[in-house]
Amino acid sequence: MQPGSVYAIKEGKDATETHTLSVLVDNEPGVLARVIGLFSGRGYNIESLTVSETEHEKHRSRITVVTTGSPQVIEQIKAQLERMVPVHRVMDLTVTGKAIERELLLIKVRGAGELRSEALRLAEAFRARVIDATTESFVFELTGKTDKLDQFILLMQPLGLVEVSRTGVAAITRGPDAT
Amino acid sequence: MARQMTGAEMVVQALIDQGVEHLFGYPGGAVLPIYDELFQQDKVQHILVRQEGGAGHAAEGYARSTGKVGVALVTSGPGATNMVTPLTDALMDSIPMVCITGQVATHLIGSDAFQEADTVGITRPCTKHNWLVKDVNDLGRVLHEAFYVARSGRPGPVVVDIPKDVQFATGTYQGPARVEHKTYHPQVEGDPAKIKAAVELIAGAKKPIFYTGGGVINSGPEAAALLREFVRLTGIPITSTLMGLGAYPASDKQWLGMLGMHGTYEANNAMHDCDVMIAIGARFDDRITGRLDAFSPGSKKIQVDIDPSSVNKNVRVDLGIIGDVAHVLSEMLAVWKAAGHKLDQAALKNWWGEIDRWRTRKSLAYRQTSETIMPQYAIERLYEKTKALEKATGRQTFITTEVGQHQMWAAQHFHFDEPNRWMTSGGLGTMGYGLPAAIGAQTAHRDALVIDIAGDASILMNIQEMSTAIQHELPVKVFILNNQYMGMVRQWQQLLHGNRLSHSYTDALPDFVKLAEAYGAIGMRCEKASELDDAIDAMIAAKGPVLFDCRVANLANCFPMIPSGKAHNEMLLPEDATDEAIANAIDKAGAALV
């Protein structure tokens, strides 16, 4: 059964995949709303979304979006993105492979005594930096792949985790050429 | 050709530069500067509608009947929000339309000013693209870009939102010469390797079928001509979606009639049993496919579409060719001829034998036995009369419809031999589309016979546009199949909800004859089958707009039908549609579907 149709009596049972898409867009007003609206309007998932202007003179921005869906849905997402008027190109970094993905995490941990020193030890093991400290708290900065960040957050939970802020995934292909 | 002018002047100049002759609109505070410019020129004719939605549907009818971009002009706030339905309708049916909306002055945006609405925000999901123009120096470029985007690739509606201060401001106007768009370049030429593979697949087919859609009409008259040549050359049967009617002549022997939920038995069975399906400009809509896991299970599928997102969306195809229909068909024909292909004639003969057997079921049959007019009979007589008229005088007929049973009966019983003569709201199913669309078509074709085949419920959704027809001397004919019900709603209530007819009976219909007269139009009524022909003749002969109240059998239902959740070969035929069959046609799972 195909999802997304009124005739889909059974829900799609196709295995879902996670894909990282890099979308090069004209940095015009509303372009992010257009992309997000496409995802919400058509019922696609957004796991992570990162957007920033990358080429100022050309007015271009790069939107990196991590999404999940069946292979057919992923194909639809790419086709739907590609036909939007301000979209230059859509690259599926999961298909092209060899892409590097990084995310930045800021995490606040509050505690004293043994818990506090354990948090610091783990931060060192993860190569997280202390960017703010009080006598009862730390703010750590950590860059890495999504699963590394997830793991660090998990470890901080029993040690007095207060709050988390993450940037979402930025991604780029390896090698000398532009994607 | 950079010239200094005000934003309002730019709008009118851009319309002239784009060759726009007619514009449908309604004035209001935030577009007054543009209306002031319109007043001072005579190149662009403005058709004043009675509600902004009417302007949108009129622009759609105009676009659909001419192949040109339809243009609408409305004010901010409610003017823009009233356009949301026509914009969505045009997006679903791929109709090229440019809608210009006024907006409150830039410094007032976001302040909840009088008649302010976030027009670009509201219309973002229902347009192909939209723009809010904050600098008058961008206006000329944006307007020409808007026309380019609306008509290129898969056509669609666009909105240009212009704040009032930008309309007053003076700046540099950029003409249409610069056509190169920064990002939007749809692919029109198909991949030669895929075209070759498709032609070979067709050549080896034993039970092939063409399944064509609105994309053929949108691609232009050349696409229809190429389609006809290819279909006749190969001898392959052809069916079409609601939106594609007229691309292939309905009078031809290779024509199987429309397919889908209310399509013919032969078309749907041929789709189910074919071995090679050639889908051209058609998007495998749920009204076409029926139950997806049982849709044409044994066939190889070729799909030609200009929109990559239409390929593999609902149905997996074996060969998806991205490109413009006319371009791809022309290539396919060239390859076919160069290779000297010919189908296996014995197999083709067998295939036609099967189709002819399905045809003998006469799935569109109905019984006209008493003086009570059957709705199908009314359409058939209307068709015969207009055909005779065209034969005798060359006067062309354009048909628009509202949405419901009458629409399906029109699609089944009115036969189209030419493209662009049939305008209906297919994807969105917008009741109230037909009358304004007829006004749009009549504006473009002053001397043609333009008929809105309507239902008694639908027509009341935009009846105010009768006043537009009178003002602009547009002699549209509204042929109402009046059964006093929202017939299709009632039909579904009979199918799904134990015949509990919740609010589908219209208890207080107006007297349509008096209503017509109140508008200054001609009102007619016909209640007897024996009087129908003369009444239709009188309607056609009438010089002005007509509301024709055709009283038809109240409880007639629209068959054949593929009930929700069923496959193409599980159709409900008229002779099988007993009360019991209707009550049990749809199972629980199907009931949840639309």
Image: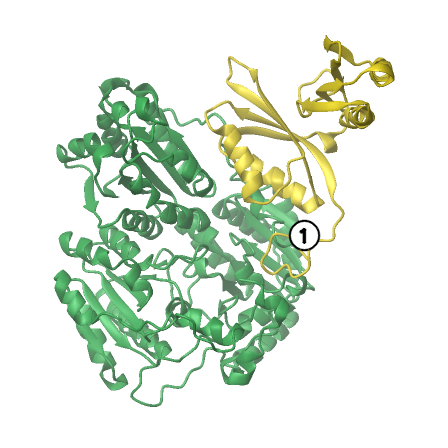
Chain colours: A yellow, B green
Where B414 falls versus B64 (above or below)? Answer: below
Q: Return the residue found at the far bottom.
A: B370
- Provide residue B112's location: percent of width, then percent of height: 33, 31
Q: Mark 1: few, some, or many residues within 10 Å (few <14, many ≥20)? A: some
**Percent position of residue B469, x then y:** 19, 56
What's under tag 1, amino acid-wise?
Answer: Asp
Q: Which residue is mark 1?
A: B318
Query: If the image is split into quadrants, where does the N terminus of chain B sit?
Result: top left
Expressed as whole percent of the image width and height from the top left, the position of residue B570 reads: 61, 74
Residue at point 30%, 42% (across, down): B78
The subunit letter for the residue under badge 1 reads B
Residue B51 is left or right of residue A3, and the answer is left
Give percent across and percent down for residue A17. 74, 41
Q: Measuring 51% from the left and 84% from the top, which residue is drawn there?
A: B579
Residue A65: quadrant of the picture? top right
Q: Is residue B60 left or right of residue B466?
A: right
SS for tag 1?
loop
Left or right of A7 on screen, residue B159: left
Residue at image position (51%, 64%) is B239
